[in-house]
Amino acid sequence: MRTPAARTRAGSAALAATAALLLGLAAAPAAVAGADHRQDATTLDGLAHRSGRYFGSAVDNPELADTDYANLLGSEFGQTTPGNGMKWYATEPRRGVFDFTAGDEIVNYARSKGLTVRGHTLLWHSQLPDWLSSGTWSADELRSILKNHITQVVKHYRGKVFAWDVANEIMNEDGTYRDNIFYKTIGPSYIADALRWARAADPKAKLYLNDYNVEGTGAKSDAYYALIQRLKADGVPVDGFGMQAHLALQYGFPYQMRQNIQRFADLGVDVAVTELDIRMILPADATRTAQQADWYGQVTSACLAVRRCVGITLWGYSDRHSWIPAAFEGQGAALPWDEELRRKPAYDAIGAALTAAAVRRTG
Ligand code: XIL
């Protein structure tokens, strides 16, 4: 039974809510940002939460100084991924010397805003420190370097990072293993070892393999399907498959994306869309922008159609801070917010897809 005092509190809360509604303040941000946006049906994360998913955006350290950008990130999204701050060059700039400054900055920001953090990435062929990529290593030496790196980084973020991209981009387009320094030196066993070391360092973190051009069916996603099936059969800890989803209008929508997500889920792993952006050849025009919106809606629906597709992360949420123009000449306009942080049609398409899924779930 509620005490009179509790009734009074509830009564005045109801009154305040009515007053706020009348004043049009219903969605006024909480004074201390917590996980409130998770319940707020006017944000993408709030809408996703109604279907048990998160909606996130990556952030690169310098962007946190852009206050408008950082505030919108903190209110609209429920999850973030450091764009660069946890990569090997940043976390172990000299052999055996770890620097968690950049990653910690993002974890602290995320905590202050009530966002969860995906860790990215423990092992990749790119953005390695020079000491590592230009060194000459025996298989045993490199194995112990890799083990130490994974152990130190994952331990440092234990309890702060809920999922790790353990291995990033380890396959070629034709489904053969990428000839990265680990494959060349150690052979394919480095993949299972990396997963085991990550598990030992944080038994609770979800461990992912992550790559691009795997959103649809094809040789590359077939290779991951076979690899995950084998790892599972061997008892290797693999919990998830990350589809980066760096899409481009000129290359067509990924073939059978929903079915592809489903077959990975059926293997017994989670799936996440980890780095979504949808670029176009510039200039953007109304037709391309409308097609982009349609694709954002389609990706969202494909994920939400599969129970084990746990969430979606944009690779930055606005054209103000996007890696695309620097990486793909003449292309851009890839995100749902423009350079002025105004919403584009893609925003509404994502919102509509999230809403439709929430209605299906409760209806
Ligand atoms: C990108 C970052 O966004 C850029 O700032 C950096 O210069 C290069 O890397 N796939 C990945 C991400 O897994 O780590 C990449 O991030 C984008 C492609």
Image: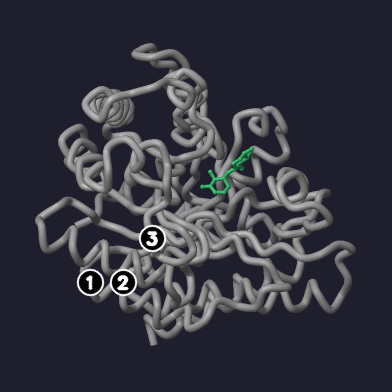
* Relative image position of residue 216 (x, y in whole percent): 48, 75
Which of the numbered marks, if any, corresponds to residue 176? 3
Taking the image as shown, residue 182 lies to the left or right of residue 56, namely left
Do residues under tags 1 and 2 come within 8 Å of each other at their CB atoms?
A: yes
Q: Are marks 3 and 2 in contact (CB under 8 Å)?
A: no
Front position among marks 1 and 3: 3
Q: Using the image as rendered, state which of residue 300 and residue 208 is in the foreground.
A: 208
Tell me: residue 183, above or below residue 283: above
- At label 3, the amino acid type is Thr
Badge 1 density bin: few <14, some 14–19, many ≥20, Cα 10 Å: some
Q: Which residue is tagged 2?
A: 264
Question: Which residue is rendered at x = 56% and y = 50% of the image?
Answer: 57
Identify the disc placed on residue 321.
none
Residue on which disc 1 sits: 267
Identified by mark 1, the residue type is Leu
**Within the image, what quadrant is residue 118 found in?**
top left
Q: Of marks 3 and 2, which one's residue comes earlier in the chain?
A: 3
Q: Nearer the viewer, residue 313 or 214?
A: 214
Image quarter for ligand 1: top right
Query: How much space separates mark 1 and mark 2, taking CA atoms?
Result: 5 Å
Position of residue 196 relative to residue 76, above or below, is above
Label 2 SS: helix
Q: Quadrant of residue 74?
A: top right
Mark 1: secondary structure = loop
Nearest-to-viewer mark from 3 and 2: 3
